[in-house]
Every structure is written in structure tokens, then in C-alpha cells.
Image (cartoon, rainbow, N blue to C red):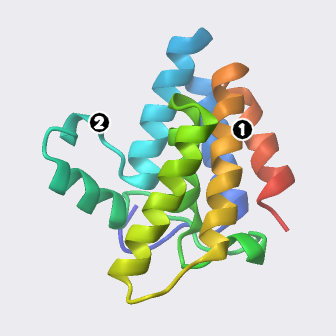
């Protein structure tokens, strides 16, 4: 797939997540594999680049290998052409971090965007990030198999 051409919206995203969840090995190690795999592809989160913090942060702000357009997403959770990038970044955080740390990271990221984008604050990004944090915690608690239903129930119109 051409990196410049986003996939169609929520339906393709749910199909992708369902396929990846089916590939995940059982148990927590499989859930961790799933999070690392899907978040690298959808949010450019590559832990192997964490040693170079500048590159790591630049990647996360850039276009990931897989992009999904806004078709079928709840408008109140969308503030750009690829809502999956922001959502999956906070699924990642919610999977690994307790909620107070996740909320702190969400607001810190939005504050950084506020500075970077010249005073633009996005309540939609905050709302989408909160959903992502909750979904990441549920994947950690149960398994990747819960995520497609959560996406359909809370992200789709």
C-alpha cells in the first residue's frame, strides 16, 4: 500500500485490528506484541527509537505507515484526516501506564501541540485520547480480541 494513500475509514480500521488481534499469541505477551505491532504501524510508535528522543517524537507526530481516513468515525473524536494515529498512540499509553499517568501524558501532548500549532487546543483530541487510554487498559486486562468491538461501539458513528 502506498504510504501517501490512506485506507478507508472505520470499517477498514476495524478489519485491520481484527486481523492483528487474531494473529496475537495468547496471554499478556501476545497482547504486548499486538500493541507494539499495531501502534508501530498506526501511530509510528517504535520503542527501538526511544534512545533518540528527538527522532522518536518526530516519528510520532508524523504520518505512520498505515493511515485511515475519517469515514465512519464519530465527528466529535476527529480533528484531522487520520484519527487513528492519535487514538492508537493513547491505546499504547493506556496499555502500559496507569490512568493518572496516561491522563497526564494526554494533556502534556495536547499542550505541546498547542505550542507547536500556534495556540490551537483540540477538545476532540482530548476526547479521542481518553477513549484510547480506556481501550488500551481493557486490552491489557482482557486481550486484543476486545478492541474491535470497543472501536465499533465507541469510535464509529
Give residue 147's mark.
1
Q: Earlier in the sequence, mark 1 or mark 2?
A: 2
Q: Residues within 10 Å of mark 2 (few under 14, many from 20)?
A: few
SS class, disc 2:
helix
**Residue lying at 44% horizontally and 88% vertically, measured from the top left:** 119
Residue that label 2 marks = 47
Of circles 1 and 2, the one toward us is 2
Q: Is residue 75 left or right of residue 57?
A: right
Cα distance in 3D space between marks 1 and 2: 22 Å
Looking at this view, is 94 or 22 the one in front? 94
**Quarter of the image holding residue 150?**
top right
Q: Residues within 10 Å of mark 1 (few under 14, many from 20)?
A: many
Q: Quadrant of the N terminus?
A: bottom left
Residue 52's label in the rendered image is: none
Residue 62 appears in the rendering = yes
Name the residue nearer the viewer: 119 or 59. 119
Q: Position of residue 87 (x, y in %)?
A: 59, 56
Q: Nearer the viewer, residue 112 or 154?
A: 112
For the residues labelled 1 and 2, say whether their Cβ atoms are less than 8 Å apart. Answer: no
Q: Tell me the SS state at disc 1.
A: helix
Q: Residue 89 at what x, y percent from top left?
A: 49, 50
Going 76% across and 59% down the picture, which residue do you hit? 155
Relative to 104, 59 lies left or right: left
Residue extending farthest to the top is 27
Amino acid at each position: 500500500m502506498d504510504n501517501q494513500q490512506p485506507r478507508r475509514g472505520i470499517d477498514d480500521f476495524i478489519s485491520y485490528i481484527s486481523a492483528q488481534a487474531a494473529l496475537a499469541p495468547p496471554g499478556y505477551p501476545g497482547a504486548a506484541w499486538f500493541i507494539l505491532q499495531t501502534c508501530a504501524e498506526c501511530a509510528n510508535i517504535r520503542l527501538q527509537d526511544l534512545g533518540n528522543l528527538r527522532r522518536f517524537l518526530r516519528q510520532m507526530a508524523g504520518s505512520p505507515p498505515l493511515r485511515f481516513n475519517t469515514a465512519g468515525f464519530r465527528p466529535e473524536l476527529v480533528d484531522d484526516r487520520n484519527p487513528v494515529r492519535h487514538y492508537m498512540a493513547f491505546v499504547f499509553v493506556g496499555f502500559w501506564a496507569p490512568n493518572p499517568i496516561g491522563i497526564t501524558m494526554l494533556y502534556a501532548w495536547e499542550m505541546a501541540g498547542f505550542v507547536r500549532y500556534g495556540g490551537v487546543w483540540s477538545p476532540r483530541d482530548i476526547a479521542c485520547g481518553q477513549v484510547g487510554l480506556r481501550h488500551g487498559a481493557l486490552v491489557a486486562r482482557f486481550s486484543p480480541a476486545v478492541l474491535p468491538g470497543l472501536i465499533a461501539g465507541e469510535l464509529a458513528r
